[in-house]
Every structure is written in C-alpha cells, then in structure tokens.
Amino acid sequence: MSQQSMPSSTSAKAMPDAFIILFFVVLVAAIATHFVPAGFFEVALNPDTNKKELVAGSFQFANDYQGVPLFAEHGGVGFLNFAFEGMVSGSKWGSAIGVMMFIILTGGAFGIIMQTKAIDNGILSLIDKTKQLELLFIPLLFLLFSAGGAIFGMGEESIAFCIVLLPLMRALGYDGVVTVLVTYVSTQIGFAASWMNPFSVAIAQGIADIPIMSGMNFRIIMWVLFTAVGIIFTMHYAAKIKRDPKLSVCPDSSPIADVSTLEKIQFNRTDAVVLSAFLLGIIWVVWGVIARGYYIPELASQFFTIGVVVGIIAIVSKRLTINQVADAFKKGAQELLPAAMIVGMAKGIVIILGGDQADQASVLNTLLYYTGNVLGDLPETVSAVCMYLFQSVFNFFIASGSGQAALTMPIMAPLSDILGLPRQIAVLAFQLGDGFTNIIIPTSAALIGCLGVCKVDWFVWAKFIWRFMLLLTALSIATIILAVMINFS
C-alpha cells in the first residue's frame, strides 16, 4: 500500500515523479486546446441502462470554443486552476472527490488493520506451520500472497516478508528468486486479476462510472487461473533448483536475516479475533455490493467501519492504545494521500480539455473521435487488445495503480463507448496491463526493493522472468478476447 523510499544513490536515475509527469501532461493538454478544435456528440438515453449513450456518427465540431487561459478568475478554468478544479469536481458518487475520499478513508482503515500486525502474524504463523510440508509450503504461500494482492492491494509489504522468508527458503534449498516469486510476483498476480482491490480495479470502475465489484464472477475465475499458472511456474523452478542448486539463476543470493525470526512469532487470540472481524467485514462488503447495490459512499463507510471495529478490538486487547489507533489511521490515510491527490489532479486534465460530457463541446471529444476512427476500423477484439497493450506500456512511466487509473480511465472509458465495447472491458484492459508489468519494470519501487533484499540483480531477474511475462501477456490477451466475445459488462 505504501511507497518505499529508494536509496539516494538511485535518485538521480529515477523516473520523474507521477506528479511531475501529470503537470506536463496538463500543460500539453492546455496548449492543445488552442490548436485542436473542440467537438461534441449527440447522445440518447438507453432505456435498458437508463444512461446516456453516444449516437453513432453524430460527431460535430463546435464553432465558438476558445482555448483555456493561463489563469482564470471567478471560478473559471485555466491552466493554473487545474489542481483545485480537479480535486473539487464531481460528487460523492464518483470522480474526483468521491474517489479521493474513498482512497483516504480506506487507506486509514487498512492502516489500523496493518498496525495490529494480525495479518503479518497470521502469515508468519502459516509459514512456520507449513515449512515442513514442502509440497504445500510454496502453493499455500503463493495463494495467500495472491489473495492479499487481490483483496487489499498488497505489494510493497512484500519487501518485509522477503526479509523474513529468504533465510528459510535458503535453508529449504531454494534461492532468492523463489522468494521473490512467492512474496512479490504472487501479490502482483492477485493485484492484476483482482475482483475487489480498493486501490486499483475499484477506483477504475468508479472513474468509469460502472458499479464497483461488478463483473466479480468473471474476475474471480480469472484470478484462480492466473494464480494457478503462477504456482505451477514457481513450483517448476523451485523443484529444478532443489534437485540441482547449480541451476539457480542467482546462486549467490545468501540469507540476510536469522531463521529464528519465525520462532519469535506467536499467533494469539487477538490476532484470530482481528482476522475474523476483517474477514466478516469483507463478506459484508461483498454482500452490500451484490445484494444492496452499494457504491462508493457505502463502500468507503464500510471499510471505515471495519477499521473502527478492528481498532476497538486492538484497544480492548491492549494490542494498541487509543492514540496508537488514531496514529495508525492517520498514517494509513497519509500513505494514500498522494494517490488520492493524483486522482483529483488527473481529473483536471479532463476539465482542461473541456470536460467529459459527450454532448458538450470539448477537445477531449475530438481526440476520442479521431482515436475511435483509427481503432474503429479494427475488429473489436483487436481494439480491446490495443487498449491493454497501451496500459502495459503506460505503467512503465506511472507504476501506481490508482495513479494510472486516474490518468487513463477518463479517456479509455468513453473511448470504449465509441468502439462499441463495454466499459467493463476498458477496466479489464487497465487492470491486466497495470498489474502484470509491475513484475518486470525497473520503475516499480516494490520490485526493486524485493530484488535488493534477496540480492537478485534486476538484469538477472529480467532475463529469468521474461518468458513468464510472455505467458502472462498471452493469457491476458486471451482473457480480453474472451471478454469481448461474451460481451463482458
């Protein structure tokens, strides 16, 4: 959930911060409004969905549109107004303000949950109890970490577990690569194939104006498939180097911690109660979405409630003091504040381009029209795959799920309308493109952190993992093609 700080020696070579990229994207958008003519579409109400949809072939250019100024007064929109205007736009039901508050409240709630250490202790206890069952050890861990990525966006937390697991893996005859596969790659598979990750797919669905956790059944099947593929790949490599350690791609990855760390972990009644409350809370969230049609306001309040309940349990059990619970909430919200801010500021791009209303003149409509013309001549499946490939490449520059959703979904969602594709497929292309590339891109702080802990050079890792990445890409494309064929919506 949080971004780990990188060593100072790498700062000079680091990619520009997402906020810097965003600023220049907005600058380009503002300049474009003076050269690209604005346009609009005709819309009609769909009686089945009760939502407005574009009328095919209805695009027209506007005659009286002017580019945005440098600064606007009295509530107007100018280039230097984009941050504020973006952050206060929308309503509690969606982007930007609703999604921003959802991120902050959910981040605070998970801050409390993680501060109790119940999840950490549960995972470490499972490791300790299954380390003698080698046939189940790796699959169970992989499944657990993948579920963590799918349910609450686990990612950077993998670095800590690499520290704990590496000596144990070495003692069992494995290497640092197996450790990274089990702790980090598994979370990114879960992240990419998630049905409810509040920091990725839920944000994308909120921005795309489709029900959060919709399409859950399809995504759960997808998660099971990709997780199974990851387990098989990991088990194959682990078995190979256990038979012959010389086949390890990084034989020099040595332990950096003491195995006795596991012996100090005691999973007690408080941990069990906290995890039970968390599980019941997740069940409540799923029930609310399916049975009651809960959306962003209810979901944010549900996660907040889960955090409050866990905080009360921690206080009663004397795991945390009342002030520590408050500090954990603030810290969790603080860690997600940049993600929330970038969602709001990215909305400023859309506002600078004239807004996201199809029936109102905007440069965005013109860009969508011409992009639609380029992709519209292609089969729907090819267009959907192109959207996935675009998201995969874009993730190299912004390796943040929420940040990428904020920047791309305002364009990809209406583009899917023009192409005749359900917006659910635009979200699917986003989550698969965003999640899986985190396994190899050097701009992912979590990946570099895990590789550093396990003493695996990135070039060694890239040479090892690229075939698996091709497999995941092929499976992702097949999944998207299937989604188009069944009209996944």
Image (spheres, rainbow, N blue to C red):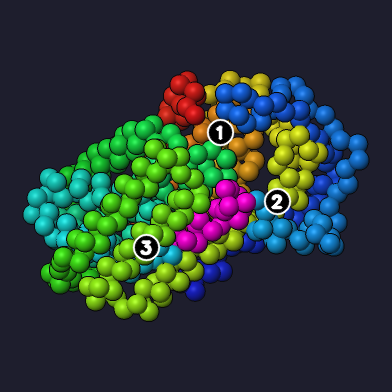
What residue sits right under mark 2 in the picture? Answer: 349
In the rendered image, which quarter contains the N terminus?
Answer: bottom left
- Residue 426, can we see it? yes
> Which mark's residue is nearer the viewer, 3 or 2?
3
Q: Is residue 276 left or right of residue 467?
A: left
Magenta range is 91-107
Report the Cα–Cα distance between label 3 and label 2. 33 Å
For label 1, the crowd category at 10 Å Cα-Cα, with few meaning under 14, some 14 to 19 and many 20 or more, is many
- Residue 249, can we see it? no
User: In the image, residue 163 lies at what x, y percent?
Assistant: 27, 66
Q: Which mark is residue 307?
A: 3
User: In the image, residue 445 lies at what x, y percent?
Assistant: 45, 61
The residue type indicated by label 3 comes to Gly
User: In the image, residue 484 lies at what x, y percent?
Assistant: 50, 24
Earlier residue among tags 1 and 3: 3
Q: Residue at x 37, y 33 (%)?
A: 217
Q: Is residue 16 left or right of residue 309?
A: right
